[in-house]
């Protein structure tokens, strides 16, 4: 029987202490459940598998910009969605085939466009000016790079405004409900036979499945209109983006890929009838629940009657949680110095980070067994956008990230810890 992810995590936390991956000289570390990443990729493939439908899954590199993670996902059949030259370089370093890379960005330079065309990777233009640039760059006849246009269905916001990409005034894509926009898009395709894809990305944290499905339906209906006007199947691929929300409140995975695929089948049945190839761009939902930040409690103190545990996990690794705690709350697991769950009556306390500003708190007034100097805290569900996207406040060095797998577990370094020499060199020293 396969071990539950929570049990694997608990075993890995103890093993990380036993093997010296964390200690006084390395007080914070990221841990990633590699077996969990493989299982998530398998769940994604199974959820969208449909006879007669070609599906290309890509991973949003920004969610975990670590070459070994991209390589592992590529081995599991998941390509890469990139949004910058750096992310493209990481995907190529991981060996992701060009045919499974998609370039999306609202600010692509001419050089980025030329590189994508030369490599033959898929490219989604964001706006009319970018299409005009492509008009000058695309060679006569066909191009090896699959090309499309991103549209904004303007179906509304989720519960986190900053993460909502399909609002009336979103910076992404061509806004379909603006006056004359749909007619302009149809004409843009008729004038450019090399435009064969249509892209939308409605989902993200805080966006319900119904809203995500509504955005995909709007793109599907537009593709049908384009193909009718063209009198042929010009749009052959629908890139439906990613953005599946993650449950940060418990170890339960909800919603899962199956639930989303089923919602799409109900809302847009034509999506799966074999006339369109599909592309997905999931990120957070593939790796968030597979990651844990582990940090030492350096000091335990009190102020105004409030217990405060000062740890080495703060804004530098939990940036979103520190600056937007209401939108990005994290669970905190209290551990003893050996990495075992700590006993004791819950005490209201703050869990603070090492950064030199008052708001550097990963949890406020949280009820936990009273933390003491030398104890550890674990922050689950941090496999995406946390330890892989470091915030260099106070010149705190990037922590090591280790992957774990198997019954041991066996650890492998995904990113070594940044040394002070590295930091000085990076800062022009």
Image: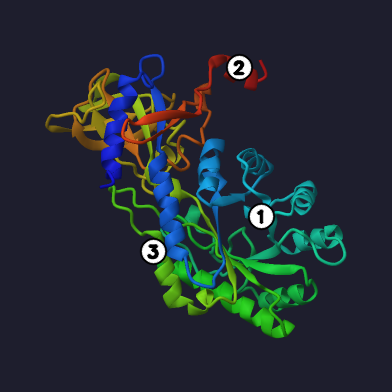
Query: Secondary structure under badge 2?
Result: helix
- Residue 426: x percent and y percent? 63, 22
Q: Residue 34 is drawn in which quadrant?
A: top left
Please name which of the two marks, 2 or 1, marks the residue nearer to the observer: 1
Of the two numbered discs 1 and 3 on the same chain, state the one appearing first in sequence. 1
What separation in Å lies between label 2 and label 3 (alpha carbons)?
47 Å
Residue placed under numbered mark 2 in the picture? 424
Residue placed under numbered mark 3 in the picture? 258
The colour scheme used here is: rainbow
Q: Is residue 311 above or below residue 234?
A: above
Query: Secondary structure under badge 1?
Result: helix
Which numbered circle lies on residue 99?
1
Of the two numbered discs 2 and 1 on the same chain, state the one appearing first in sequence. 1
Q: Is residue 175 visible?
A: yes
Residue at 62%, 39% (x, y): give it.
90
Which of these two is toward me, 37 or 343? 37
Q: Residue 185 is drawn in which quadrant?
A: bottom right
Which of these two is toward me, 66 or 34? 34
Residue at 53%, 46% (x, y): give it.
75
Q: Residue 9 is drawn in which quadrant?
A: top left
Q: For the residues labelled 1 and 3, say whether their Cβ atoms are less than 8 Å apart.
A: no
Q: Label 2: few (<14), some or many (≥20) within 10 Å?
A: few
Would residue 152 appear left or right of 299 to someone viewing this image?
A: right
What separation in Å lies between label 2 and label 1 (alpha carbons)?
38 Å
State the residue lying farthest toward the front: 1
Would residue 293 appear left or right of 307 to someone viewing this image?
A: right
Which numbered circle lies on residue 255?
none
- Residue 352: x percent and y percent? 34, 29
């Amino acid at each position: 029987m396969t071990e539950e992810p929570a049990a694997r995590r608990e075993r890995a936390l103890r093993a990380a202490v036993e093997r010296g991956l964390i200690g006084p000289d390395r007080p914070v570390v990221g841990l990633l459940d590699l077996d969990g990443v493989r299982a998530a990729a398998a769940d994604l493939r199974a959820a969208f598998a449909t006879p007669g439908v070609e599906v290309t899954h890509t991973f949003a590199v920004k969610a975990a910009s670590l070459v070994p993670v991209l390589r592992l996902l590529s081995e599991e059949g998941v390509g890469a969605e990139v949004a910058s030259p750096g992310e493209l370089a990481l995907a190529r370093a991981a060996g992701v085939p060009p045919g499974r890379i998609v370039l999306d960005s609202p600010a692509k330079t001419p050089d980025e466009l030329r590189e994508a065309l030369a490599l033959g990777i898929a490219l989604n233009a964001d706006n009319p000016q970018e299409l005009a640039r492509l008009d000058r760059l695309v060679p006569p006849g066909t191009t090896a790079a699959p090309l499309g246009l991103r549209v904004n269905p303007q179906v509304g916001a989720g519960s986190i405004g900053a993460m909502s990409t399909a609002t009336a005034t979103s910076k992404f894509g061509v806004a379909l409900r603006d006056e004359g926009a749909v007619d302009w898009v149809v004409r843009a395709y008729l004038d450019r036979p090399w435009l064969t894809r249509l892209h939308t990305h409605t989902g993200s944290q805080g966006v319900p499945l119904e809203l995500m499905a509504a955005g995909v339906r709007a793109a599907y209906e537009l593709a049908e209109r384009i193909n009718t006007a063209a009198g042929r199947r010009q749009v052959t691929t629908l890139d439906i983006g990613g953005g599946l929300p993650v449950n940060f409140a418990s170890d339960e995975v909800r919603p899962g890929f199956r639930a989303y695929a089923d919602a799409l089948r109900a809302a847009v049945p034509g999506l799966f009838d074999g006339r369109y190839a599909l592309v997905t761009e999931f990120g957070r939902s593939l790796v968030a629940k597979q990651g844990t930040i582990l940090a030492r409690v350096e000091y335990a103190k009190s102020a105004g009657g409030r217990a405060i545990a000062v740890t080495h996990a703060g804004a530098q690794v939990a940036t979103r949680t520190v600056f937007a705690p209401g939108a990005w709350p994290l669970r905190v697991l209290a551990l003893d110095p050996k990495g075992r769950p700590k006993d004791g009556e819950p005490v209201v306390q703050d869990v603070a980070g090492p950064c030199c500003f008052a708001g550097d708190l990963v949890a406020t007034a949280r009820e936990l067994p009273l933390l003491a100097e030398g104890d550890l805290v674990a922050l689950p569900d941090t496999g995406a956008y946390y330890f892989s996207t470091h915030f260099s406040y106070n010149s705190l060095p990037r922590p090591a990230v280790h992957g774990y797998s198997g019954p041991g577990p066996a650890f492998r370094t995904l990113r070594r810890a940044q040394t002070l020499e590295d930091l000085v060199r990076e800062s022009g020293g």
